[in-house]
Image (cartoon, rainbow, N blue to C red):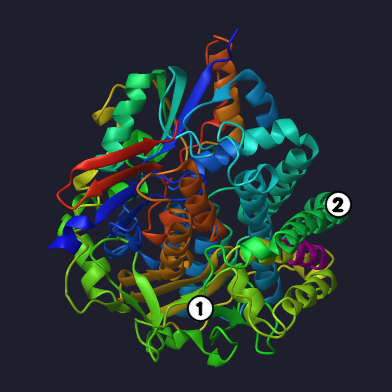
Amino acid sequence: MATKNALKRIAIEPVTRIEGHGKVTLMIDDEGHVVQARMHVVEFRGFERFAQGRPYWEMPVLVQRLCGICPVSHHLAAAKAVDCIVGGENLTPTAEKMRRLMHYGQTFQSHALHFFHLVSPDLLFGFGADPAIRNVIGVAIKFPDLAVQGVMMRKYGQEIIKATAGKKIHGTGAIPGGINKNLSIEERDVFLKDIDQMVNWAVSALKIAKDYTSEHLKDLASFGSFPSNHLSLLRQDGALDLYHGNLCAIDADGKKILDQVNYNKYLDYISEEVRPWSYMKFPFIKSIGPEKGWYRVGPLARINNCKFIDTPIADKELKEFKALGNGKPINITMAYHWARMIELVHAAEKIKALLNDPDLQGENLVVKGKRRSEGVGLIEAPRGTLFHHYRVNENDQIVMANLIVSTTHNNEPMNRAVQKVAEEYLDGKEITEGLLNHIEVAIRAYDPCLSCATHAMGRMPLIVELMDTSGNLIDRKVRD
Amino acid sequence: MDKPKIATTSLAGCFGCHMSLIDIDDRILKLIQLVDFHKSPIDDIKKFSERCLVGLIEGGCCNEENVKVLKQFRKNCDILISVGDCAIMGGLPAMRNGIPLNECLEEAYLKGPSVYNPSNKIPNDPELPLILDRVYACDEVVKIDFKIAGCPPPADTLWTAMVALLNGKPLELAYEMIKYD
């Protein structure tokens, strides 16, 4: 068959400066049209099975070992699920606020890490700049003040996590039905001293992302972009809420698909398709089906979904962002960075408000009620909505564990972004640096954590191979 | 004189050890004056093109790709260090070692309550590296020169170890800097 023989395969591995293991393959026909683009996630852990038999109270500590980049998100989603099992989902004010402080600290450090350590090299040096300088070390040399801000912001978030969870990475603060410590006055005062600086730095980071997006809007508008549905948790009144809420989803034009749905019933609304070429599944909204029911999650989806933000600076910035879409959702992939920085500011403002709340010094840390055999916990992790669901037997052992992780929701969108960029930048049959760079930039916009997604973690490499369908190598390029 | 080179990788780990390295905070600016980072997930260098003094390995080996990368590191680095419990003994991913691999795959891709899998197939594309029968510690695959324990090892421990190594001094860690949780 002539058409089949004309198909060529391109593999890209590893993709760096993203968080997870994976590779990209492209199939092109003899006219150079991309007929298929796939981002394969190549890691598999098997958590769903090996969690079985473990006592449920281990889950908040166990699950975070799936991902050291946002362990707090797994820690808290698991804790929320386990709260239901002990009948303790209505936390004391001290417990809920300590957990929220931990979560905003986490969001603050994760967004700062992503922006300064991973993305800023692309924005500051350009997508096509020499890879030898286009990295965080290059930023540290050329823009030392900015690098120091990034480092100090991450440090601040990590110190908040340490004060609330006991440890910067893989802490133990959240326990079934509550929390194991409050925040002392001494701890609080250390954070209060620097919080205004953090808010100011967050605002200036936001300005970099906003100005960059506005200045390059013409090019970025189409870059790896496509219409999509958007899913996130929202507070009952439509406010952005990263710790708790109901499931909400809108389509590419802003029409409601899921409106304030209780997340305990997520199985009625969400399903995950298995495809043979990736260990990462493909979630979709059941009422629309696997073809068209896929959606985006994370900062862009949350900012598109929410009606307002309950902190003043972030809310003002939200209005400016939304003006770009004239009331419709923004479907520009690179707008993720801007949306992420609005959340960075929001997290800083929330931390400030919480630090001034005397409930953090409360003594009432744990509640328990009627025991149940099942619990579901959802949270808005930095990268998007995170689902944990457990069933237990009468011996307190896990008999079923189901996780749908933030990056998994963005699986189809990332594949679409790769296809879009490949169509635009693949020049004939030769693999150019430009193609490699642009594919990585598009994937990086989603801040993917492929580790979490397969309940695995690592880095994604960059080798491109061009092959015909009989497997003969036509061109090969490795970036040194 | 050229600065010594460091390469890092995350195999079957969670990236927490790399995060802990970043938690040395502003000392990272000092570190980059002492060493050059070569192949590492934090930069865009994807292939060894120069000999490295130190290779830091996070994570054990759960698939053939991990084994390949680990062997590359052994070949290109003078000193190879297992960082964290997964590299040293498999860690949390090794919890699957007592369970047949098929049961793990079936749970994730056939039995899970949110799974939609009309073809009833477990992912099997040739693009996916083969999964090993169990998770292996790094020193079961190649020779490892040093081990730094912890989940993850605290940032201060990693910093102290790097400074000692780069200055050719013996590694003396205070009791509280060696964490085994």
Identify residue type, mark 2. Gln
Asked whether disc 1 touches disc 2, contact meaning CB atoms under 8 Å apart, the reply is: no
Identify residue type, mark 1. Ser
Residue A197: image tag: 2
* Between A126 and B91, the one nearer to me in the picture: A126
**Quadrant of res A152:** top right
Q: How many marks?
A: 2
Residue at 80% of width from left, 38% of height from top? A145
Q: Is residue A146 above or below residue A423?
A: above
Query: Mark 1: few, some, or many residues within 10 Å (few <14, many ≥20)?
Result: many
Q: List x then y, in percent, for residue A8.
A: 26, 53
Q: Is residue B11 above or below residue A317?
A: above
* Between A174 and B102, the one nearer to me in the picture: B102
Q: List x then y, in percent, for residue A458.
A: 42, 46
Chain ID for label 2?
Answer: A
Q: List x then y, in percent, for residue B101.
A: 18, 55
Q: Secondary structure at mark 2?
A: helix
* Between A260 and A378, the one nearer to me in the picture: A260
Name the chief secondary structure element in magenta. Answer: helix
Q: List x then y, in percent, for residue B11.
A: 37, 41
Q: Is residue A117 left or right of residue B12?
A: right
Q: Mark 1 — residue?
A: A228
**Which-is-in-front pick, marks 1 and 2?**
1
Residue at 57% of width from left, 36% of height from top? B21
Q: CA distance from mark 1 to mark 2?
A: 37 Å
Q: Which residues are magenta?
A: A344-353
